[in-house]
């Protein structure tokens, strides 16, 4: 398949991804490409054309949207058997903002697992629905609707339901965070909290310091808000403090985002000393810290470590909390703790975003927590997750080849696995999907999408039996790829 590009921009203003898509569409129309023909892999075509992989991914996405191609993880991208409007004029494509184009390119680079319904889901951070306390929560929800009536069906204040803020303030204080209910802004999970706190401190063109690797939705949020990121490498003990110091000294860096407990994707937890040193550096350069504690309630073993918010004495930490992983994600309830004028600013940003949260759910959750049902649920969930984590650790020890390394999380839902040198987990993923196991390749946790021998495994959705099967499948794929490596090397000599 031949594609000619005008590198300095097409004469009619078409960006490069549109040139690629239009060229493929034209080859379909002329019969050079036929229904069922397989297109080159995104990585291969990007290398052939000398463009970024995101550019090719965006072109393929546009072709999929217009019905020219069909794509699935593990199989590839094919010319559609029934092509809608491929031979005629191209469908209207609205002009999107550059930020939206960047966000689309980022999203297209994420793996899609829609066709892999039978594989072991060790990629997912969605909690196992069989653990949801659906009946108990429904009874509480029905009761608060009956008792509090129409007032719960109105708009609420931007900070959220007072009863839930009261309950959370009490829990946060028991964890050492000096906060009152008026210092809490409720939000739609930690994900909205990330966007709100980014907007609190930065505007388009500014920079947020992040860990590398980091939670991939943080990268998406930064792109959507027009922010740049300053990656700080993660070491065994946490983010590199010497690089942090250099980074926060830069005036364009407005805040630090960090996950000190049960890091996503690494699963690691930093020491009290590391946390104090981090706070000292941030305070010295007068830079706020956004602490993501979205899995705070899922400690499985080990001694609890005070949060950054609990150790902070300057009011410079905004702490994010969420019920999405510890209870169920459908509630979409999280919280931001802040101090002083930051609280009013967050409330204003929240009001400008969505006016109000769903008061019936917040009121029901306040009752659910205050009557002890949430803590009983946590006890059950922690026992299940501890068993699954230990099964995963044992399976990795038994099945994975020599040279494989992994973290041992004290809590949360995920751990990081580093494969033997020479393997790229993005390239490995299609084989793993065919073998019956899903994982998150390391590339998606880096701002530049670099090749990575790391991957994230979770024990959120899969039970113990499935975890054992999934690790066996992963080990088989890795061993096959390692056994092929010497032969491939000889062929290139």
Image: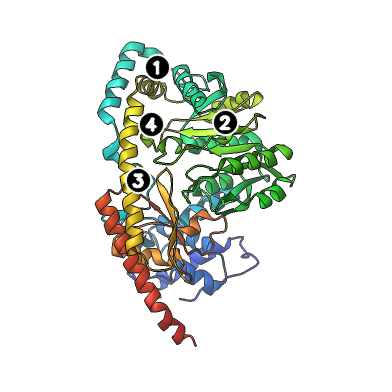
Q: Which residue is mark 2?
A: 310
* Mark 2 vs 1, N-terminal side: 1
* Picture residue at 27% right of the left edge, 22% below the top: 139
* Mark 4 vs 3, N-terminal side: 4
How far apart in space, not on screen, are marks 4 and 3 (Cα)? 17 Å
Q: Is residue 225 visible?
A: no
* Residue 174 picture location, percent across and down: 49, 25
* 220 in relation to 180, above or below: below
Residue 87 vs residue 297, the one in the foreground? 297
* 450 in relation to 253, above or below: below
How far apart in space, not on screen, are marks 2 and 1 (Cα)? 33 Å
How far apart in space, not on screen, are marks 3 and 1 (Cα)? 32 Å
Q: Is residue 272 visible?
A: yes
* Mark 3 vs 2, N-terminal side: 2
* 89 in relation to 298, above or below: below
Q: Nearer the viewer, mark 4 or mark 3?
A: 3
Quadrant of the drawing holding the N terminus: bottom left
Residue 60 vs residue 143, the one in the foreground? 143
Q: Which residue is mark 1?
A: 152
Query: Callout 3 environment at 10 Å: few (<14), some (14 to 19), or many (20+)?
Result: many
Which label was assigned to residue 331? Answer: 4
């Amino acid at each position: 398949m031949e594609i000619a590009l005008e590198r300095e921009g097409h004469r009619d203003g078409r960006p490069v991804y549109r040139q690629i898509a239009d060229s493929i569409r034209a080859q379909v129309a002329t019969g050079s490409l036929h229904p069922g023909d397989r297109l080159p892999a995104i990585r291969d075509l990007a290398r052939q054309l000398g463009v970024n992989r995101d550019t090719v991914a965006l072109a393929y996405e546009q072709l999929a949207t217009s019905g020219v191609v069909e794509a699935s993880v593990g199989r590839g991208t094919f010319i559609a058997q029934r092509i809608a409007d491929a031979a005629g004029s191209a469908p209207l494509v609205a002009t999107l903002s550059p930020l939206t184009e960047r966000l689309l390119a980022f999203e297209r680079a994420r793996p899609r697992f829609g066709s892999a319904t039978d594989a072991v889901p060790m990629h997912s951070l969605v909690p196992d629905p069989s653990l949801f306390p659906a009946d108990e929560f429904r009874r509480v929800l029905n009761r608060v609707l009956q008792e509090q009536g129409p007032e719960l069906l109105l708009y609420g204040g931007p900070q959220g339901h007072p009863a839930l803020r009261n309950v959370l303030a009490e829990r946060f204080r028991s964890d050492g965070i000096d906060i009152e209910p008026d210092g809490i802004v409720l939000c739609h999970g930690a994900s909205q909290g990330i966007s709100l706190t980014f907007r609190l401190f930065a505007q388009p063109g500014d920079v947020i310091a992040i860990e590398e690797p980091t939670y991939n939705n943080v990268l998406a949020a930064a792109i959507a808000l027009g922010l740049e990121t300053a990656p700080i490498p993660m070491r065994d003990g946490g983010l590199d403090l010497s690089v942090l110091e250099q980074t926060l000294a830069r005036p364009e860096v407005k805040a630090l985002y960090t996950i000190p407990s049960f890091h996503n994707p690494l699963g690691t937890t930093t020491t009290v000393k590391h946390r104090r040193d981090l706070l000292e550096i941030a305070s010295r350069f007068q830079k706020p810290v956004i602490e993501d504690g979205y899995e705070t309630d899922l400690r499985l073993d080990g001694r609890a470590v005070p949060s950054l918010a609990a150790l902070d004495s300057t009011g410079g930490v905004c702490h994010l909390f969420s019920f999405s992983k510890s209870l169920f994600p459908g509630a979409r309830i999280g919280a931001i703790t802040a101090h002083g004028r930051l609280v009013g600013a967050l409330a204003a940003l929240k009001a400008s975003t969505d006016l109000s949260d769903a008061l019936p759910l917040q009121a029901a959750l306040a009752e659910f927590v205050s009557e002890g049902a949430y803590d009983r649920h946590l006890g059950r969930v922690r026992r299940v997750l501890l068993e699954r984590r230990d099964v995963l650790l044992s399976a990795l020890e038994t099945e994975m080849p020599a040279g494989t390394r992994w973290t041992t999380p004290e809590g949360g839902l995920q751990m990081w696995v580093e494969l033997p040198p020479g393997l790229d987990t993005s390239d490995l993923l299609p084989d793993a999907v065919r073998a019956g196991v899903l994982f998150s390749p390391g590339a998606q946790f880096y701002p530049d999408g670099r090749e990575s021998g790391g991957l994230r495994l979770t024990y959120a959705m899969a039970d113990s039996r499935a975890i054992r099967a999934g690790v066996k499948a992963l080990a088989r794929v890795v061993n096959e790829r390692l056994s092929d490596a010497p032969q491939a090397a000889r062929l290139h000599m």
